[in-house]
Image (tube, rainbow, N blue to C red):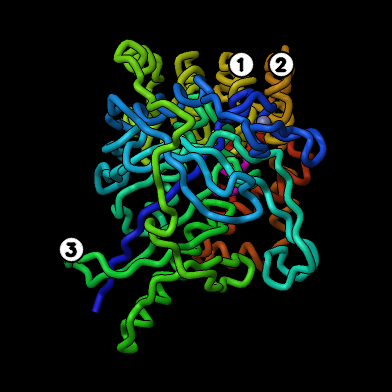
Amino acid sequence: MTWQPVVGLEIHVQLKTRTKMFCRCANGFGGGENTQTCPVCLALPGALPVPNRIALEWTLKLGLALGCEIPKRAVFARKNYFYPDSPKGYQISQYDLPSCVNGRMLVPSSAGDHEVGIVRAHLEEDAAKTVHVGGRTGRIGGAEHSLVDFNRVGTPLVEIVTGPDIHSSEDARRFLQLLRQTIVELGISDAEMEKGTLRVDANVSVRPAGSAELRTRCELKNMNSFRFVAQGIDAEVARQIAVYEAGGEVVQETYDFDASSGALTARRSKEEADDYRYFPEPDLVPVEPPAELVERLRGELPELPSVRIRRLERELDLDRALVLVTGGLDRLYEATVAAGAEPLPVANLIANRLATSAGDAVDASQLALLVGARDRIPRAVLDDALSHIDEPGFEAAPYLAQEAVSDTGELEPVIARIIDANPGQVAAYRGGKEGLLGFFVGQVLKETGGKANARVVSELVRERLGA
Ligand SMILES: [Zn+2]
């Protein structure tokens, strides 16, 4: 039987507001443990929450970018649970009346746009950070004791819940890349998985291909990169298929995925919503965003990554468009093409040779000059130029002046020497192994200290060996 994976994602995004969600403590890294706290976020008796207006606006903005409807009224609710990372004994979240509902994101794929439903996006406060000391894994099992840092408690967190619309680990990864880039461009979060400002849980089930049923799902937690999310999904899909094919049943469970070993470890059975005894937060009034505010925020949205991918795909191809846009490099690409460089070489050079962080600092007109000269200047000079191109005041001119050696009179003796020194490779090349051309060109470049024009060398070598 063929099986189809069914995946829904829950994504937590830590907003980079200046202050926390319900108090005026600083939000962010820095400062020693337990220094960014006050009576409100430590839940001392009598302290009352005041919502952060910027966090509310940013949640709406994200919801609008994800095509959500903004209900006229959202209500904060208490989600009751007891744990050392939650000093109040509950978390302020949104429950049946969230800030954003019914959105969708279009994920471009070679088979057309893949639509992922956004069930809801709501605003809540984060828990404190627990550190488990001793033990092998840094997790609670086997630890000697645990410490709590309350700097993170009460920081604003948006939770985004997708529908069960994702059917492969590759689609999940692509969706997350697009979502992350959208969040970063809205300027509301750094959305970095390594820092925990973007966290992803995956709900995974499988079903016979062609069926529409939703079977028992398991939840994967603790994956700290998009690659690990994809690996975790693949591992869980394989596990569930094996259970069904052995005649068993999948039991609802939460797993930690350990990327280094590929192992899935069961955690605890998931609480049902009833266990949290949700009720409206009595210390906060409902949130009723005025229509003018929603329209203003909608008007502030930039052109979204998925739209730009479709636009770039027309002049490049889908893969290059995806790399450029999700790497935040497509604006540099467009500016460089506008400055007169050829699209494909620009795309390749930016995607393969520039770091994502370099994008904004590069002067497109200087990059266009380098792209135009890429076959005329030595490879080593081009590399050197690219390593400095994001520095302020970078000028391409001095690099362009270093023309590569294209003079056949100068190159031919070197080529002859290399050919004489490698009779085995020559015979293999003549016997049909044409891939060895690169070997000869590489040897000549090495011999000339990288100064030879690679295109001219390759023509000369081919001519000589073809004889
Ligand atoms: Zn505080």
Q: Residues within 10 Å of mark 1 (few under 14, many from 20)?
A: many
Question: Residue 52 in magenta?
Answer: no
Decide if residue 409 is in sight here: no
Q: Which residues are magenta?
A: 457-462
Does dot 1 land on a helix, a strand or a loop? loop
Residue receiving disc 3? 212
Q: Of tags 1 and 3, which is closer to the observer?
A: 3
Task: State the image coordinates of residue 10 (x, y, percent, origin top left).
Answer: 43, 49
Residue bearing the label numbered 1:
363
Q: Amino acid at mark 3?
A: Ala
Q: Which mark is residue 394?
A: 2
How far apart marks 2 and 1 lie (CA) works out to 8 Å
Secondary structure mostly seen in the magenta stretch: helix
Relative to 84, say whether 114 is above or below: above
Distance from Cα at disc 1 to Cα at disc 3: 51 Å
Looking at the rendered structure, the secondary structure element under dot 3 is loop
Q: Is residue 150 left or right of residue 102?
A: right
